[in-house]
Amino acid sequence: MQLPVLNDAPAHAAEKKGGCSASSCGTTDNQMDSLPDSIREKVQNHPCYSEDAHHYFARMHVAVAPACNIQCHYCNRKYDCANESRPGVVSELLTPDQAVKKTMAVAANIPQMTVLGIAGPGDPLANPERTFETFRRLSEEAPDIKLCVSTNGLALPDAVEELSKHNIDHVTITINCVDPDVGAKIYPWIFWKNKRIKGKKGAKILIEQQQKGLEMLIAKGILVKVNSVMIPGVNDQHLAEVSKVVKSKGAFLHNVMPLIAEAEHGTFYGVMGQRGPTPDELQDLQDSCSGDMNMMRHCRQCRADAVGMLGEDRGDEFTLDKIEDMEIDYQAAMEKRAVIHQAIQAEMDSKRLEKAEKAQQHKQEPKLSTRPVLMAVATSGQGVINMHFGHAKEFLIYEASPDGVRFISHRKADQYCAGDTSCGDGESVLQVTVRTLAGCEAVLCSKVGYEPWEMLEAAGIMPNGEHAMEPIEEAVMAVYKEMAAAGKLDSTPEAVRASA
Amino acid sequence: MAVKIIESCVNCFACEPVCPSKAIYEAKPHFLVDPKKCTECEGDFPDFQCASICPIEGAILNSLGEAINPPGSLTGIPPEKMAEAMAELQSH
């Protein structure tokens, strides 16, 4: 079975770097060709690892791990904030017992939840007792849930043995550098062998521990994904090297995420005015790394207590006082979950098949010689265009080119239409949303209101509500062909962004 | 002779397990140090263990009441820069 996920370039496509620079042509199929079946099997229903699966399956994080053993310049340890959505932020710290209860409550109520992760708000492996107690109990009491952990890597070598005892087949290590000089600009200190060690010396130890941990996990047969934060002027040039190194050691996926830095977060980078990358810079780096490595592009950089599909957070429905009142019969829930998972799997399989057929058709049609175009899509899941423009909290960005359609990234948007009668300052939020879509030439959604329609047109973005409920890739390709037929896509080389 | 944890503590638990004297305990609204048990790590470690892992500047005081990790020492953010950023935010 083919798993059409994860943007990855087969070696031959990486060399030519033209037109469709990161493969995934026709559809996003064949992207995981380089992965062995055993890995595909493991990731096919994991929303964080599979671009395809993230349209169908949900995840949750439990915040049981408050302590940390290092400081990163993009993190502020005063983490308690309800209104922010970024890693390291949580509202409610849980004990392992509360975490187990919450996980089972969510699993029973959101049956498409397949994955439980521990990601903080500190470092899970700097809280080994709370983290492993949670894993131990969940692998016994909720054996149908996949368990994951995410770590900075400092304490990883000492934890590998314990990790391999539980139901954990995925570990994420955040590796921002393999060079201590770069590390010194990202990590001000680490706590190591009863000492706070600052600067390059600390960074060197951290890097050694990360690499050692990575090697040990691979030797144990545990899947490793590597996260990197792209920090312009600090490690952006260096991350291609990181990608090469981690790939050579056996990591199966590299997730390059943009730095989030705002002064109000109180982080070093935020206060010092370090900027994050633009969407173009991020895409260029992901494309340049994709020759060496499976790149992940659908990460939402979620909170350490997020609940639901990627891009949504239903944590409010499962606060401690609410789960206290829930009576969960997990045995019954598990049976129901199994049925639902099977149905989703069947739907995904049939969609994949359809996609493969369309791709085959596409290959047989005469090839266009038009330039690539970015399009934004509003969706709430299931891989179809099914969301009203004004209700979209985020847009998925796809690139259409003569080679096909590939997923590029997501962009967050504030909802300007909350559905009430008075729109308040809706208009300015709408302007922000339109700005968010800069670089896109069309936006596909189930419906678009009159006002945003005009504003989008004025910004050079063609609104399109004609493909409601259609599969995303097909609709994007259809619109691309219409644009080509209408002569909107000249093929002058300077316009071809991706072939640069 | 004892260190003290003050209200800027964010309850991250990091200090509790590293204390060689088991002098640190969870309390509301924040972690506390039992002054009878705290040895300031004398005889065990050259550095205060709690203050060596604490991520919050100013949250742990020495027996003279001084911040063991003064402003700017952990985050690297110069205090005047932080003040500037906060003033800027409050003016909005």
Image (tube, coloured by chain):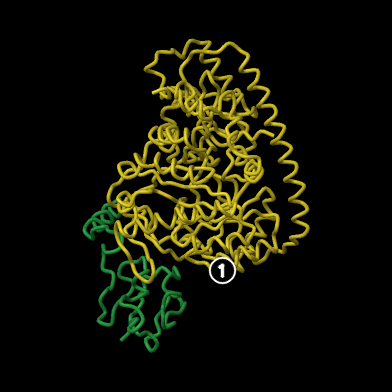
Chain colours: A yellow, B green
| Residue displayed at 33% across by 41% down | A232
Is A354 drawn above or below residue A51 in the view shown?
above
Q: Is residue B81 left or right of residue A328?
A: left
Tally the marks.
1
Which x, y percent locates residue A343? 75, 41
Q: Residue furthest bottom?
A: B36
Quadrant position of residue A118: bottom right
Q: Chain of mark 1?
A: A
**Pointer 1 residue:** A95
Which x, y percent locates residue A430? 44, 35
| Residue displayed at 31% across by 58% down | A188
Which x, y percent locates residue A318? 61, 59
Q: Is residue A97 left or right of residue A80?
A: right
Q: Name the one closer to the observer, A423 or A102.
A: A102
What secondary structure is marked by label 1? Answer: loop
Q: Residue furthest left?
A: B80
Which x, y percent locates residue A265? 36, 54
Q: Is residue A194 left or right of residue A479?
A: left
Is A488 drawn above or below residue A333 in the view shown?
above
Quadrant position of residue B66: bottom left
Q: Name the one closer to the observer, A12 or A295.
A: A12
Is A386 drawn above or below residue B87 in the view shown?
above
> Split into 4 quadrants, where in the image is the N terminus of chain B?
bottom left
Q: Name the one closer to the observer, A131 or A416.
A: A131
Q: Name the one closer to the observer, A480 or A407.
A: A407
Q: How dense is the environment of label 1, judged by Cα within 10 Å: few (below 14), some, or many (20 and up)?
A: some
Q: Amino acid at mark 1?
A: Thr
